Image (cartoon, grey):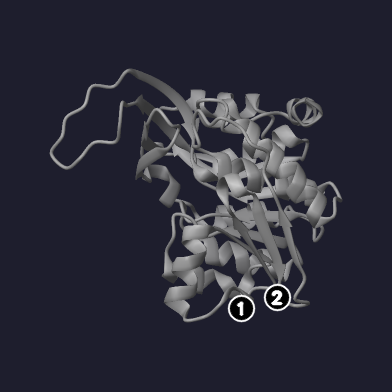
Amino acid sequence: MAIFNLGSVNIDHFYMLPHFPEPGETLSASGHKLGLGGKGMNQSVAAAKAGAEVFHIGAIGQADTWVRKRIEGYGVNCKYLREVSEATGHAVIYVDPEGENMIVLDPGANVKQDIEFVVEAIDQAKASDTLLLQNETNLQPQAATFALVKGMRVIYSAAPFSIKAVKDLIPDVSMLVMNAVEASQLCSEMGVSLDQIPAPQVMVTLGSKGAMWRSNETGEVIEVTSPKVTPVDTTAAGDTYIGYVAAGLDLGMPIKAAMEWAVQAAALKVTRAGTADAIPSANEVKSFRAA
């Protein structure tokens, strides 16, 4: 089995701040560093570090060949990562002393996906494989439809939140994943409760409280709690969780076991500054669980 991920790739600029700026306020950063991120790539890296075979489908700028090498170094297969004339997407990330963050995105090459290329990549997958999707690229609905026709599991992260994007994708989604804020927004926009969302499975991440999964086919609900840690940087915690859940399911774990594994990985991630570089490996999560 394998995971195919139509996902974003961003060059991340991190600024460590004494507090988040108010309108019109100028702040001096206490530190700056460069990394790689994007919800898509973070999820690919998390799944690969968890031990799954991962193929990332996406686009980067022609001048950023180092980006491909870095991603491959994380264990992600980049044969479906195109190089295009547009610049690689980038993010400006503010991090406060409590580890909370504010993020501004420029999508760049992420929204220049080519339909023939994407379909050809997904066509290499098997029915037992998984497709991951988020809202930081174009062509998600087409990819979801094609993957579902092939019989694949389609896991969709409704972030950054867009009600239009959710409505476009939800008919072809196996599992809809949101954080608590996104879930509240979706239920308000659609005028429904979680159990009425027209998706077979719904997962809600709850930050330091853990996560909840619900089957809207059977009514089964599973909740898992997160270990208590002192956060350094919460960036990519949700992506780490989703990548580990996807990897767990791909490796044959029951949903509860995959969720319990994933909350451990996400908790360990928030003790580290950074995005993809800071996502823990399966061995690190195992040691963390045993500690």
The image shows residue 290 at horizontal and vertical percentages of: 81, 28
| Left or right: 281 in relation to 31 | right
- State how far apart marks 1 and 2 are (Cα): 8 Å
**Which residue appears farthest toward the left when viewing the image?**
24
Q: Report if the CB atoms under discs 1 and 2 are less than 8 Å apart.
A: yes
Q: Amino acid at mark 2?
A: Asn
The image shows residue 108 at horizontal and vertical percentages of: 37, 43
Q: Which residue is mark 1?
A: 198
Q: Is residue 78 visible?
A: no
- Residue sitting at x 44%, y 67%: 185
Query: Quadrant of residue 229 in the image?
Result: top right
| Left or right: 227 in relation to 94 | right
Query: Quadrant of residue 153 in the image?
Result: bottom right
Where is 183 relative to 280, above or below?
below
- Residue sitting at x 40%, y 38%: 101
Q: Exactly how many numbered labels are in the figure?
A: 2
User: Quick one: 95 or 116, which is closer to the camera?
Assistant: 95
Q: Is residue 157 visible?
A: yes
Q: Amino acid at mark 1?
A: Pro
Query: Quadrant of residue 237 in the image?
Result: top right
- Element under disc 1: loop
Q: Circle 1: is it few (<14), some (14-19), or many (20+) Cα within 10 Å? A: some
Q: Which residue is mark 2?
A: 216
